[in-house]
Image (cartoon, helix red, strand yellow):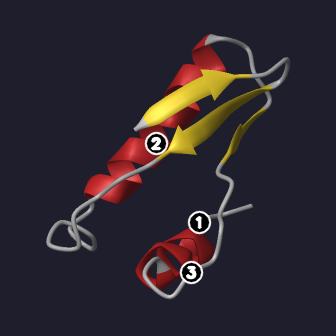
């Protein structure tokens, strides 16, 4: 995971997971950690930009399960 910060958000630039680990909760823990980082820095949100491709459809399905 490569992340950065803007004036009001923590932004994930790169988030890579093996297809073997996806669905085991690691991805949720990673996003929760980004939320903790945002809170600790007083930032309003976490941004997870997504570029749709055929290969990252599982990532889209995961992102759709997250609260706004």
Cβ atoms under marks 2 and 3 closer than 8 Å: no
- Left or right: 16 as drawn, with respect to 31: left
Q: CA separation, marks 1 and 2? A: 10 Å
Q: CA separation, marks 2 and 3? A: 24 Å
Identified at 83% across, 23% down, the residue is 8
Pointer 3 local density, CA inside 10 Å: few below 14, some 14–19, many at least 20 = few
Residue beneath label 3, please? 53
Residue beneath label 2, please? 32
Q: CA separation, marks 1 and 3? A: 19 Å
Total residue callouts: 3
**Sequence order check: which comes first, mark 2 or mark 3?**
2
Pointer 1 local density, CA inside 10 Å: few below 14, some 14–19, many at least 20 = few
Location of residue 18 with respect to 12 vertically, above or below:
below
Identified at 20% across, 68% down, the residue is 24
**Sequence order check: which comes first, mark 1 or mark 2?**
2
Residue beneath label 1, please? 66
The quarter of the image holding the C terminus is: bottom right
Kindly indicate the quadrant of the structure image that contains residue 21: bottom left
Q: Nearer the viewer, mark 2 or mark 3?
A: 3
Location of residue 1 with respect to 41 vertically, above or below:
below
Q: Identify which residue, 49 or 34, lies in the foreground.
A: 49
From the top left corner, tell me how far across and down residue 42 is, in percent.
73, 14
The quarter of the image holding the N terminus is: top left
């Amino acid at each position: 995971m490569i992340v950065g910060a803007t004036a009001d958000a923590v932004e994930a630039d790169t988030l890579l997971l093996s297809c073997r680990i996806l669905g085991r909760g690691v991805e949720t823990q990673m996003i929760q950690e980004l939320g903790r980082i945002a809170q600790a820095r007083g930032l309003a949100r976490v941004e997870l930009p997504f570029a749709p491709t055929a290969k990252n459809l599982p990532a889209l399905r995961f992102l759709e399960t997250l609260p706004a």
